[in-house]
Amino acid sequence: MLASELLPAIYDPQKYDVDLSRSEVPNIRLAFEMACTEARSFIDLLRDGADVQLGLLRFAFETFQECEDQGMGYRSLSLAEVLSARRSLQWLFGIFLNFAYRAYWRHERPDCYLRFVEWAKRAPGWPVVVTTNWDFVLDTLISASYGLDIIDCGDCEPSLDVFLTRYVAHGSPTGKAISLYKLNGSLDWLYCPSEKGYFSPLFQPPWNMGALTITQTLRLKFHNPDEPIPNELRPGYCVNCGTPLEVRLHTPGASRARLPMEPRIKQNVLAAVRNCCELVFAGFSCPDEDRDVVEEIGASLRINPLFKSGDLIPTVIDIAGPHGQDTKNRFERALATRIEYRDIGFKAWVDSLT
Ligand SMILES: [Zn+2]
């Protein structure tokens, strides 16, 4: 499911093949309908009669953040109601993207993603993928294919990052490695509200939160309060400060969402770009809000030896496109270099790889 389909799906989930009637979890349908109702009334309040379009998603996330920062509600809603609407919306997105993910595995093997990972493995050095996607199809396949210790998500201190440590120690990656930087976070990342920091599941317990915990969060919702909570349903606590962790998403392009884990992820993204052998932007169109970070990536790219020798041309894959020349121009201006722009979709692009 594309980001542009997430809000329409809360109004008409059946149209997007979201069918919870056969769930093993009792009451899931009721909980789902309640979340849809709550999310819809919040979005209706925001849009005030306007169409449901992608910009509204950004507006919604900015509004959540502003209300939280200022400790204020929105129009007729209290702060608690606004934050509850955010939880419902994120929970629904988790379900929608999880459905898309499962449907993908059920109906066809994700051949194009697998071929992409194979292509990255064949690359002679360090491929770097930058994306704004929340789902984790690619993460899962990379983990399965590479092993956990050599994926760099860019979310930890470089000194703790196994891959970067190897890089620093050996001057080059040992074995094969890939970086997958998710600029807007991910459904399986966790947020520490005290530190205002994000962590991938590798670096915070319970290592199984996110979209995969939809069933768990539901079980918790309907858990009998007289019985002890089983361990697998306990919320995770931050390893740094002990605060309960949350699932928190940002919307693509939101000004506040840019590189939410600064400075850690930024440091790692820019370090990776200076040394990578392939640079792929997957799934975003470089809106104005993303321009600053793409410009910084461009500055790092110009230090890259392979780029300087003309052996590295960044690739932009317009998954939701085609958006045509506009996207290409925006990337070329922000990166200050020519790019390989593929608006034929991810599958066709992968098919074209040798
Ligand atoms: Zn913390």
Image: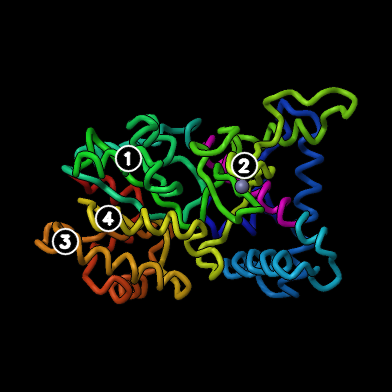
Circle 4: element type: strand
Q: Which circle's residue, 4 or 3, is located before the other in the chain?
A: 4
Going 73% across and 33% down the picture, which residue do you hit? 21
Label 4: how many residues lie within 10 Å, few (<14), some (14-19) or many (20+)?
A: many
Label 3: how many residues lie within 10 Å, few (<14), some (14-19) or many (20+)?
A: many
- Residue with the most extreme left position: 309
Majority SS type along the magenta span:
helix
> Where does the image place residue 352, in percent across and percent down from the top left?
22, 48
Circle 2: element type: loop
> Where does the image place residue 103, in percent across and percent down from the top left?
53, 36
Q: Which circle's residue, 1 or 2, is located before the other in the chain?
A: 1
Going 75% across and 43% down the picture, which residue do you hit? 32
Where does the magenta region start and end? 85-103
Task: Give the residue type at disc 2.
Answer: Cys
In the image: residue 229, left or right of residue 176: right
Task: Give the residue type at disc 1.
Answer: Phe
Q: Report the residue marked by disc 3.
A: 307
Distance (Cα) linking label 2 and label 4? 32 Å
Residue 16 seen: no
Q: Which circle, 1 or 4, is nearer the viewer?
A: 1
Q: Report the residue marked by disc 4.
A: 279
Task: Give the residue type at disc 4.
Answer: Leu
Distance (Cα) linking label 1 and label 3? 22 Å
Q: Report the residue marked by disc 2.
A: 238
Q: Is the CB of mark 2 within 8 Å of ligand 1?
A: yes
Q: Which circle's residue, 1 or 3, is located before the other in the chain?
A: 1
Circle 1: element type: helix
Circle 3: element type: helix
Q: Which circle's residue, 2 or 4, is located before the other in the chain?
A: 2
